[in-house]
Amino acid sequence: MAKEPWVDEDACISCGLCTDNVPEVFRFADSGKAECYDPTGASEQEIQNNAVDVCPVSCIHWKE
């Protein structure tokens, strides 16, 4: 995987869309905010379509 998803926990509002849509990649951290715990748990396209594109505060980004 060339790109890795990253969650800006300061911007996350804990809506749960990413954790519900791609639980193989995202979960809630102890802080109550989403985190990427397994960046290889789903394809880049699935992560893009079901997490990055639907995040209401755009706090999920790609790092290379």
Image (cartoon, rainbow, N blue to C red):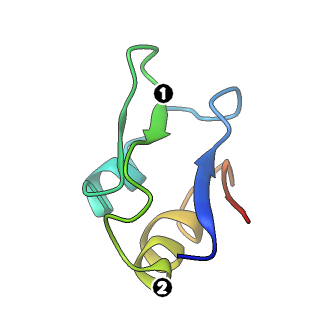
Give the CA separation, mark 2 to mark 1.
Answer: 23 Å
Left or right position of 56 against 11: left
Q: Position of residue 53 (x, y in %)?
A: 58, 71
**Residue 12 placed where, x, y %?**
60, 35
Task: Give the class, few, some or many, for how many residues have Cα within 10 Å of label 1's Cα (few <14, many ≥20).
Answer: some
As drawn, 17 above or below 12: below
- From this view, report whether residue 34 is shown above or below residue 25: above
- Return the residue at label 2: 45
* Residue 9, horizontal then vertical, whole percent: 62, 30
Q: Determine whether the residue tagged by mark 2 lies in a helix, strand or loop.
A: helix
Disc 2 packing (10 Å; few <14; some 14–19; many ≥20): few
On the rendered structure, is 48 left or right of 40?
right
- Residue flagged by tag 2: what amino acid is it? Gln
Between 13 and 59, the residue placed more toward the observer is 59
- Tell me if label 2 and label 1 are in contact, CB under 8 Å: no
Q: Which residue is mark 1?
A: 33
Q: Position of residue 54 (x, y in %)?
A: 53, 66
